[in-house]
């Protein structure tokens, strides 16, 4: 009997905000879906789009990038670089057949443990609807123009 | 008399430019012809596939294969030449990275064939004839996703200088370790004649399309808002396109330290945008209407995104 | 040579083991490539837990260690130290969070275990690529710099100096004292501001450990924690400080018979001459010449009676010029204060248009015995006011100007209400939104003022208009929200309780020191609760209103805290730098300059000699932005190399 599809999310969390928020979700014993795999980076500005490509290529169904709110970056501006890259990357992966909801950038501050829970649960729900990425997609559905 | 080393040239999904590049060696090609025995070169010589099949295993010193793998026939020939050769060189951007044919991976085989043979405005095909339908793979692949490749000659096409250097290195046994790209391992900016005009702190307010711009011939193109990919692209071409007042489009591919060219080039240009608000960022990015076409022009088929894509 | 990796799974009592299948993980990890030892233990962070690890390092020749337990924020340091003690480089370690990120947040045991398995596998793959790193320590220069000579800066400087530290106190005005020197009395005790401030100002001047520079501004700051090189610009006073004894005869002798220049200290309510002393208790007690107004500067043809008057001391020098000086300091305290909200931005209150609309600071000067009227509160035409209105929240708590509450205005309005009534017996109407009296004895002060007969109207004044009675009277229109109707209150004088704002040049100053500002423009503290005087830049601290509006007691407390933080660094004498810095591989760099504008710390520069980028390790904070941006992959980051992260990505996704 084939296993039910459980989406795999690779989550790049910045050390100072989102990672701490996920820790807070833990200390608060909030409960959410176990589908995320967290990779800790010091800043969302470290997230190289190559990592996103690698994650999808290795079988991730979704990629989540978590950073500090604009203006609050521990390293002052790293999250702005992440934001600019993300906007451009979003446009490009859409052309390459990755549905919009598979790649997400969320600003989550260290005190927002509940947002970690909410974002992951929401992303899992949407990815379940979209199905696994590794099936040969119906490309016509996602072509641009 | 010692036997001259045997070499082969073959073309897969390609435009023929790489064959031209060999011819562009000019007088040097005579030296090449002197030094080696070309036993297979469909564009120039009359040897047949059967001739190759008759060769003993590993009897060829090197096969230079250009073009991407797009069909069953190309895959077979690549595997055949691999069996018969000690070294295989992926010659040109298509063989190394999938090249421009790789952009077909943004669409489907069905859609492309329909577009070419049915829907395009200039097509008149009432009988719906589709040549090669049974032949084409679903996706385009670079050569090293089909066979083991020993060396890469980058470029679209590779420039004469690196071709002759590569041939010499291979013939004299002085080539770098297997798996290397036979070109300098630093980005194009190093050899670009406009390098000094690039400001130290360049942040991009917007992007211009080269077709709509009158670029200053003396200044750094990126500084003029043209999306020049020189910083992300391996050097060795002598910055030919820049000399023609055109921005680099990345045909030499990445340096050895980068796994996914398109993603890395996007990372660099993206982070250098000046705007901080989402709307302003989007406005700036409207100057790049086709991001995949810009960043993955030659390397889409080699993207880490499609690592696992099955071939048929 | 293949690595020998030790994997340790912590139970954390039942915190982890109660949800995650630890024995299953131990079996799984034992079979992973490169793993030599796979164990579990009840509490890895405990002494026996660490000793277990250390014993294996020695007996099993482990080369790498992975611990799967709680958050690295808790114990990464603990385990790194354990490795170091066992003779293994502390950075050959990777920690996996399977408690906060798994056992505590997932109810599904299989799901939690699967997550733990994937993350541990990823860590095993990653740690094999870790390289040995050394933590670099840098010394802390023992001198401190305090920027800003208001009460905050003064207190910080004195605290440090009393502890035996050498302090530079840099103030851009001709005298220290700041805004507090302009106050008459302070709430709630009604202490005379000058009486409590001037002894501290004199103490600064006299202290052997304090180098006081007035008319001085910081022009440039280079360096990093413990090693700041600060360039200070000295503006010319045209008077030699050491020669002037403060006799003021030059002022008396000045060709101007009377003052013509609006006096900034008295907010333009009086006039001074081109040569002047900012206020009587100024420190240093040295006059200053205003080059914009002095005839000698404008025409070159003045009789220079001031020089004559100073013949025996010869302190006046018209040829003085600006000069710069560079100092070294290990720590910096910013106490640059605030700016008062400009009431002209709210023209409906009539400030600048109707003569008898004043700001609170102007009233401070008027009621001050050494102010422009000798302490007499008078209208512009010289009469005493009989009815005074006070408008709270001018430029505060206002979506049209500043959203914040300026924290001091309610209290100073109560104080002014008291002083006005005391001096003139006038009726006082104080129109407020809320009365904020949170401090010690503040509420009692409010009660007192209320009992003294000050009238309170709960409503924000909508506008101030002339009464039109030919007498210069004004009308305050305000909705009395307690009584439930709009009132038109006729008054002789209106006092606007203007709020506090960041200094005009706060944005420029923050960039100078490489710190951040909050959205409103106040300097940003590292943590609003637990680190209110630290900034995100090591070695730079904040004191007083530059960090946010506050009153004098809080400013003094913060100044002491900042001094203590600075002292802690100075006494420790050295500081460890984070090892996760970025570095340029020079042989790979093409000189494309993509990275140069990206670093907010100025750690990356373009070297003209090599035509390549270079990163100053001590300035690098390790965010990794430049690493991701380098288009040719020529910048690496210790502990966060591309290959290491790629291994982690492949590790969490590859199935066994």
Image (cartoon, coloured by chain):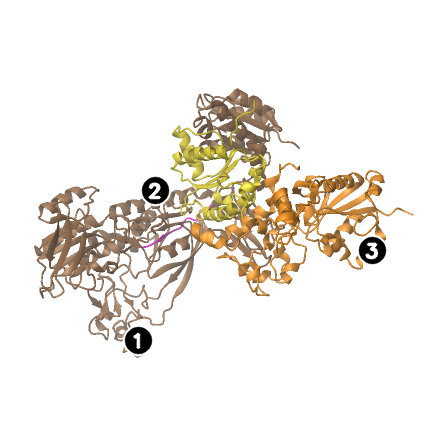
Residue stretch in magenta: C139-148
Q: Does any portion of residue C598 appear in the rendered image?
A: yes
Q: CA distance from mark 2 to mark 3?
A: 75 Å
What colour do you see for chain A?
yellow
Task: Estimate how packed mark 2 is, as few (under 14), some (14 to 19) or many (20 or more) residues with alpha carbons within 10 Å.
Answer: few
Q: CA distance from mark 1 to mark 2?
A: 52 Å
- Image position of B23 with respect to B218: above or below: above
Q: Position of residue B242 (x, y in %)?
A: 62, 60
Q: Which residue is mark 2?
A: C528
**Mark 2 falls within which chain?**
C
Front residue of B222/C9: it is B222
Q: Quarter of the image holding residue C636?
A: top right
Labels 3 and 1 positioned on one and the same chain: no
- Helix, strand or loop for disc 1: helix
Numbered label attached to residue B31: 3
Labels 1 and 2 positioned on one and the same chain: yes
Residue at 26% from the left image edge and 64% from the top image edge: C245
Furthest residue toward right: B1
What colour do you see for chain C?
brown
Q: Quarter of the image holding residue A140?
A: top right
**Mark 3 falls within which chain?**
B
Task: Estimate how packed mark 1 is, as few (under 14), some (14 to 19) or many (20 or more) residues with alpha carbons within 10 Å.
Answer: some
Q: Earlier in the sequence, mark 1 or mark 2?
A: 1
- Image position of C415 with respect to B147: above or below: below
What colour do you see for chain B?
orange
Front residue of C405/C308: it is C405
CB within 8 Å, label 3 to label 1: no
Q: Which residue is mark 1?
A: C296
């Amino acid at each position: 009997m084939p296993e039910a599809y459980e989406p795999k999310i690779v989550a790049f969390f910045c050390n100072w905000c989102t990672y701490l928020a996920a820790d807070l979700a833990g200390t608060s014993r909030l409960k959410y879906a176990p589908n995320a795999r967290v990779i800790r980076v010091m800043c969302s500005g470290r997230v190289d789009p190559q990592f996103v490509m690698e994650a999808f290529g290795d079988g991730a169904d979704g990629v989540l990038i978590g950073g500090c709110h604009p203006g609050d970056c521990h390293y002052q501006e790293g999250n702005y670089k992440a934001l600019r890259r993300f906007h451009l990357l979003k446009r490009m992966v859409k052309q390459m057949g990755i549905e919009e909801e598979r790649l997400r950038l969320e600003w989550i501050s260290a005190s927002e443990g509940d947002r970690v829970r909410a974002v992951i649960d929401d992303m899992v729900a949407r990815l379940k609807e979209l199905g696994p990425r590794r099936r040969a997609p119906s490309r016509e559905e996602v072509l641009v123009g | 008399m010692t036997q001259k080393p045997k070499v082969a040239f073959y073309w897969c999904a390609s435009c023929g430019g790489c064959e031209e590049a060999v011819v562009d060696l000019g007088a040097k090609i005579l030296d090449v012809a002197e030094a080696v025995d070309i036993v297979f070169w469909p564009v120039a010589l009359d040897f047949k596939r059967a001739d190759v099949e008759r060769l003993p295993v590993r009897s060829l010193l090197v096969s230079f294969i250009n073009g991407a793998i797009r069909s069953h026939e190309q895959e077979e020939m690549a595997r055949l030449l691999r069996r018969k050769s000690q070294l295989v060189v992926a010659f040109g951007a298509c063989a190394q990275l999938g090249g421009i044919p790789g952009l077909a991976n943004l669409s489907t085989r069905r859609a492309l064939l329909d577009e070419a043979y049915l829907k395009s405005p200039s097509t008149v095909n009432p009988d719906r004839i589709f040549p090669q339908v049974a032949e084409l793979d679903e996706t385009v692949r670079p050569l090293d996703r089909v066979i083991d490749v020993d060396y890469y000659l980058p470029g679209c096409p590779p420039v004469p200088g690196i071709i002759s250097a590569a041939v010499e290195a291979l013939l004299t046994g002085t080539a770098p370790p297997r798996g290397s790209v036979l070109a300098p391992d630093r980005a194009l900016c190093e050899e670009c004649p406009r390098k000094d005009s690039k400001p130290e702190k360049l942040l991009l307010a917007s992007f211009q399309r080269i077709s709509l711009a009158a670029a200053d011939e003396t200044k750094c193109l990126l500084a003029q808002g043209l999306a020049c990919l020189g910083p992300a692209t391996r050097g060795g071409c002598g910055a030919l396109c820049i000399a023609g007042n055109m921005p680099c489009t990345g045909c030499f591919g990445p340096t050895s330290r980068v796994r996914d060219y398109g993603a890395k080039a996007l990372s660099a240009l993206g982070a250098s945008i000046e705007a901080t608000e989402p709307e302003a960022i989007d406005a700036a990015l409207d100057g790049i209407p086709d991001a995949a076409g810009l960043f993955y022009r030659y390397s889409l088929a080699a993207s880490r995104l499609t690592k696992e894509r099955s071939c048929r | 040579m293949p690595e020998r990796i030790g994997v340790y799974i912590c139970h954390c009592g039942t915190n982890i083991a109660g949800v995650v299948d630890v024995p299953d993980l131990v079996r799984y990890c034992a079979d992973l490539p490169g793993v030599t030892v796979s164990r579990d233990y009840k509490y890895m962070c405990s002494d026996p837990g660490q000793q277990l690890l250390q014993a294996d390092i020695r007996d099993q020749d482990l080369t790498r260690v992975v611990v799967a337990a709680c958050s690295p924020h808790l114990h990464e340091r603990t385990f790194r130290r354990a490795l170091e003690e066992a003779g293994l480089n502390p950075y050959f370690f990777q920690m996996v969070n399977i408690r906060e990120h798994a056992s505590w947040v997932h109810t599904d045991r299989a799901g939690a275990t699967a997550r733990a398995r994937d993350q541990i596998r990823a860590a095993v793959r990653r740690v094999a690529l870790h390289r040995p790193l050394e933590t670099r320590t840098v010394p802390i220069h023992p001198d401190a710099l305090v920027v800003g000579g208001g009460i905050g800066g003064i207190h910080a400087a004195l605290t440090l100096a009393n502890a035996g530290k050498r302090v530079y106190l840099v103030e851009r005005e001709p005298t220290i004292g700041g805004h507090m020197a302009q106050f008459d009395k302070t709430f709630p005790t009604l202490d005379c501001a000058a009486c409590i401030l001037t002894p501290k100002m004199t103490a600064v001047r006299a202290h052997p450990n304090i180098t006081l520079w007035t008319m001085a501004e910081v022009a440039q700051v280079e360096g990093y924690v413990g090693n700041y090189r600060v360039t200070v610009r000295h503006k010319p006073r045209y008077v030699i400080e050491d020669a002037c004894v403060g006799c003021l005869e030059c002022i008396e002798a000045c060709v101007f018979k009377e003052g013509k220049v609006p006096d900034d200290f008295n907010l333009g309510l009086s006039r001074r001459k081109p040569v002047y002393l900012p206020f009587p208790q100024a420190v240093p007690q040295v006059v200053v010449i205003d080059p914009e107004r002095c005839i000698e500067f404008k025409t070159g043809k003045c009789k220079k009676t001031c020089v004559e008057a100073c013949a025996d001391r010869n302190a006046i020098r018209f040829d003085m010029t600006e000069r710069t000086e560079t100092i070294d300091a290990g720590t910096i305290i910013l106490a640059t204060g605030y700016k008062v909200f400009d009431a002209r931005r709210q023209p409906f209150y009539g400030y600048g248009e109707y003569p008898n609309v004043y700001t609170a600071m102007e009233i401070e000067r008027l009621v001050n015995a050494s102010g422009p009227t000798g302490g007499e509160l008078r209208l512009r035409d010289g009469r005493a006011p009989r009815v005074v209105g006070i408008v709270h929240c001018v430029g505060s708590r206002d979506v049209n100007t500043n959203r914040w509450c300026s924290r001091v205005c309610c209290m100073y309005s109560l104080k002014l209400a008291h002083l006005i009534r005391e001096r003139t017996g006038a009726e006082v109407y104080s129109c407020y939104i809320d009365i904020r009296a949170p401090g010690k004895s503040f509420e009692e002060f409010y009660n007192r003022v209320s009992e003294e007969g000050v009238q309170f109207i709960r409503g924000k004044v909508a506008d101030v208009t002339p009464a039109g009675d030919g007498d210069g009277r004004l009308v305050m229109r305000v909705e009395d929200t307690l009584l439930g109707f709009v009132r038109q209150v006729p008054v002789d004088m209106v006092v606007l309780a203007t709020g506090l704002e960041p200094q005009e040049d706060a944005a420029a100053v923050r960039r100078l020191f490489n710190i951040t500002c909050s959205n409103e423009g106040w300097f940003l503290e590292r943590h609003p609760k637990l680190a209110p005087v630290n900034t995100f830049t090591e070695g730079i601290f904040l004191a007083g209103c530059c960090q946010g509006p506050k009153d004098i007691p809080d400013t003094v407390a913060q100044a002491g805290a900042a001094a203590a933080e600075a002292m802690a660094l100075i006494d420790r004498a050295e500081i460890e730098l984070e090892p996760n810095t970025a570095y340029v591989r020079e042989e790979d760099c093409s000189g494309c300059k993509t990275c140069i504008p990206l670093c907010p710390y100025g750690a990356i520069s373009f070297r003209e000699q090599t035509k390549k980028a270079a990163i100053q390790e001590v300035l690098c904070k390790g965010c990794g932005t430049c690493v991701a941006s380098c288009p040719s992959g020529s910048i690496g980051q210790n502990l966060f190399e591309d290959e290491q992260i790629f291994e982690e990505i492949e590790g969490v996704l590859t199935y066994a």
